[in-house]
Amino acid sequence: MTVSGIDAQALRPHAEDAFAAELEALAAADDRPRPERWRLSPWAVATYLLGGTLPGGGPVITPKYVGPRRIVEVAVATLATDRALLLLGVPGTAKTWVAEHLAAAVSGDSTLLVQGTAGTPEEALRYGWDYARLLAHGPSRAALVPGPVMRAMERGAIVRVEELTRVPADVQDTLITVLSEKTLPVPELGEEVQAVRGFNLIATANDRDRGVNELSSALRRRFNTVVLPLPATAEAEVAIVARRVEQLGRSLDLPAVPDGVDEIRRVVTVFRELRDGVTADGRTRIKSPSGTLSTAEAISVVTGGLALAAHFGDGVLRADDVAAGILGAVVRDPATDRLVWQEYLETVVRERDGWKDFYRACREAAA
């Protein structure tokens, strides 16, 4: 059985498949002007990302991003212009998640993707060749293998480039002509591919990669940069983690764990305090470990705990179920992070009312 051509049993369906009903409802209710080849108007795209209710009723649109509304509006407005969009932020601020849902809402296809790495070749951002045909008949259009960027240009769709600052600088600059002239030369054929209306590019980069392969000034000028912040409050972060854990639990067929929000709140509190270097009440300064302790890592810790509680526990998410995951997230550098974690346990967790079970579980996990 397939959904939009995708196996319905996919472990992680693409956004356009997982939220197909919401996208269809928005398209049906959307009477606002749409840029050419956009599936939804900019207003509807923002509603899809932020959540809301439709005029005249219909299904409730679930929020995909919890954060300042203006950030989403600026991102969507950028895609409606001739400037590309760069989503910047520390790891775990939902850059990839937002980029995927923007592509799904605008183009109905989030699969046009280039994953940036230190080994990403120029061909990944331009095009490759079918070498059997190339050797047999020489350069021809039939032998050319379009990459995601070229396919997006031809279709008038959104293409995503993940972790742009991990890509070597000379390969990054392949995008300059694409973003400035909206054309991709194919010198081997004496041709060029011109982008049709609707084409744009979303890139992501994280703050911790600054200086790894810094964007050239010429390339950076082609982007409008939107910084995605960490959740402003603990309650907002708890809500994000709880929602994503529930979604992941359904996709993994994990039983629902009652009263799990209390453990989620403790995980989020630990991560925020270690991340900020101060306790939630502002009274005690503490050392921060080397890791990022992002919202995404909190989601991973709680999901792992959910699996332990469901399969090896009594079905209730407890401190024992999340302790090992927290240890793995905090202690990335055994030489320094272990001392930071032990000091935090002894000076903060041990003295906190209602956290004795959490303290014992973390001590046992670290033993």
Image (cartoon, rainbow, N blue to C red):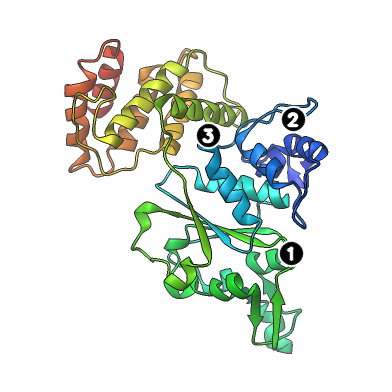
Give the label, 3 or 2, closer to the camera. Answer: 2
| Horizontal arrangement in the rendering, residue 101 relative to residue 137 (left or right) | left
Q: How crowded is mark 2: few (under 14 residues within 10 Å), some or many (20 or more)?
A: some
Q: What element carries label 1?
A: loop
Q: How many numbered marks does the figure carry?
A: 3
Against 314, residue 79 (above or below) is: below
- Give the Cα separation between the discs numbered 1 and 3: 30 Å
Report the residue at 35% width, 38% height from top. Answer: 293
Q: Residue at x 60, y 32 (%)?
A: 63
The residue that label 2 is drawn on is 54
Query: Which residue lies at the image location 66% right of the left edge and 75% below the top edge?
Result: 183
Name the foreground residue: 302 vs 36.
36
Pointer 1 or 2: first along the chain:
2
Task: Give the position of the N terminus as an image quadrant.
Answer: top right
Amino acid beneath label 3: Val
Q: Is residue 154 left or right of residue 168?
A: right
